[in-house]
Amino acid sequence: MQQQYRGMLSRQINRRIIPDITLQPMTTPTPVPTDTPTYTPTLPSIVINEIRVNQPSTDNDEYFELICSTPGSSLARLTYLVIGDNSLASPLGVIESVTDLSSYSLPESDYYFLVAEATFNYPGVTPDVVLSGNGLNFENENVTHLLVADFSGTHGQDLDTDDDGTLDITPWSQVVDAIGLVQTVGSGDRYYGASLGFEDIGPDGTSLPGHVSRCPDGMTWLIGVFEKGIDDSPGDPNICTTPTPVPTSTPTNTPTNTPVVVSVGTMIAVSSGSFIQGSPETEPCRSTNETQFMHSLSRNLAVMETEITRQMWSDLRAVQPSLPVDPSNVAYSPTLSHPVQQNTWYEAVLFANLLSLQNGYTRCYFTNSGLGTPIDATNYTGGSFYCNFAANGYRLASEGEWEYFTRAGTTTPFSCNETNFTASNCGSCTLGTHLTLEQYCVYCANDPGTTVAAGSKPANPWGLKDVHGNVWEWCWDWYDPMYPSLSATDYTGAAWGTHRVMRGGSFDGSAIYCRSARRHTVTPDHRNNTLGFRLVRVSP
């Protein structure tokens, strides 16, 4: 049977973390079952993290900083560019600065990579790359900073040949990250961040922002202090605090320490019930590990309408800073409305416990069978994991729960009635082959080369979105290749194992992998730009 799994990009990497959190040791991956697709390494998960452009008097301390998910990562294929207006002369959209990074790697023990000019002078800070003279030469008008892959252009090349604000020439294979810095909105000078699918920021009063950084690291762009040395943090975690105005008088009867409730969107009520889990032998392109059995689920659930988004991750990290930096490859989830991806199973479990703690629910995950030591940022990267399924906190769905709410009462390959899914076209990535499925699912036939914003497609019969496609979703279960033989109640997988289950398919996989019954497995430390999660809670 010919199965097509187009363009799956993956990386087996250590946890993406910030300082103060212990790095998980690299382990040897366990062989993947033969029916699991292979994965192809992609570019490192890396973004521009901080830029110093402008300062009073002479601009002699310019620098840019990258942050990467894994220390020691190679920067092969990467180039840092600045596009401006050719020093105020026409044409616009000209490459003004080129820094080839392809021969460098991050330090083995550092997440930051700092590039600066020879005149750079921050006490105690040594750049990873020092450029001779005024090597960066960042312009102080509207400009766009880009990190690109496989650059084939030249310094001084005009990329916006008709000066209309859209790049006509793109001499690279991929824009990994970009940020437009704006001095004057609507001026003749162009900035291209938003038009490239990223962001423009500025002005700072009447000036180009002199200092911009992501706060927290790798996340939202903010304008810093124009004068250098106040909130600059080259080579270190960004300084994200701002002065808080002191009230002229102390208010009375004002509550203190009011907890912030972090929203994860609409929670859909799913009542307990029974269904046939797995697929019939007549289902096209089924796998042998989908043998059917009767599964009874005794718990009522509240299920997230969508997958976890980058905005939800950012909101929780703002109040629970022990949560690691968003691990997503922003090239595949370019906005905060897109789903989180590249998170490990461990990080999904930590996220769930921190969210429960923040929102006042009982945590579900523990390190011991007596449920006395909850999973937190000090112990989540390995060891034993136990779930209190009766607790009212957030958790991953079991594999059975996931298939139950995905099927939503249906018995067909998908929860939508796709009538043209056959053995001859089940691996097709041709648009128009599965017209009904294409309305409900983002997969290889209709994907834009990335994920799409969470919830962009219509819901299944029970009101849940993206259960087919967009990103795979972690489940609780250790993988067991053999389902129970007859019937089961609240089945939660094998007692132990090496691989956890993921379900639902993704934007770059074929319809085969998006079926309600399709099972996939990877090790819990696995990262992939097509793998995310959604959470559930037990409800009365």
Image: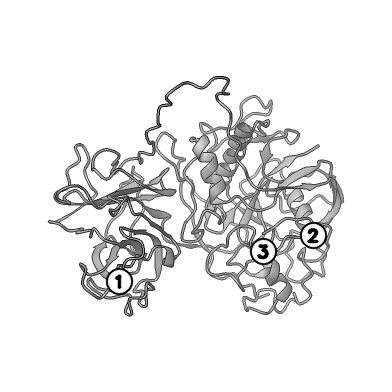
Query: Could you say which is closer to the camera, residue 512 or residue 188?
Result: 188
Q: Amino acid at mark 3?
A: Lys
Residue linked to disc 3: 457
Disc 3 packing (10 Å; few <14; some 14–19; many ≥20): some
Between disc 1 and disc 3, the foreground one is 1
Q: Residue at x 17, y 43 (%)?
A: 121
Residue linked to disc 1: 93
Q: Residue 317's spot in the image, x, y percent?
A: 51, 40
Element assignment for label 3 = loop
Q: Amino acid at mark 1?
A: Gly
Element assignment for label 2 = loop
Q: Residue at x 20, y 67 (%)?
A: 87
Up the image or down, 361 lies above or below 316; here it is above
Quarter placement of the N terminus: bottom right
Quarter placement of the C terminus: top right
Q: Residue 173's spot in the image, x, y percent?
A: 39, 71
Q: Amino acid at mark 2?
A: Pro
Disc 2 packing (10 Å; few <14; some 14–19; many ≥20): some
Query: Could you say which is closer to the camera, residue 447 or residue 492?
Result: 447
Q: Residue 63's spot in the image, x, y percent?
A: 24, 51
**Mark 2 to mark 1 CA distance (whole Å):** 49 Å
Residue linked to disc 2: 461
Name the residue at the left extreme. 133
Disc 1 packing (10 Å; few <14; some 14–19; many ≥20): many
Q: Residue at x 59, y 57 (%)?
A: 32
Residue 384 visible within the image: no
**Mark 1 to mark 3 CA distance (whole Å):** 36 Å
Query: Could you say which is closer to the camera, residue 211 or residue 275?
Result: 211
Tell me where residue 216 sits by quadrant.
Answer: top left
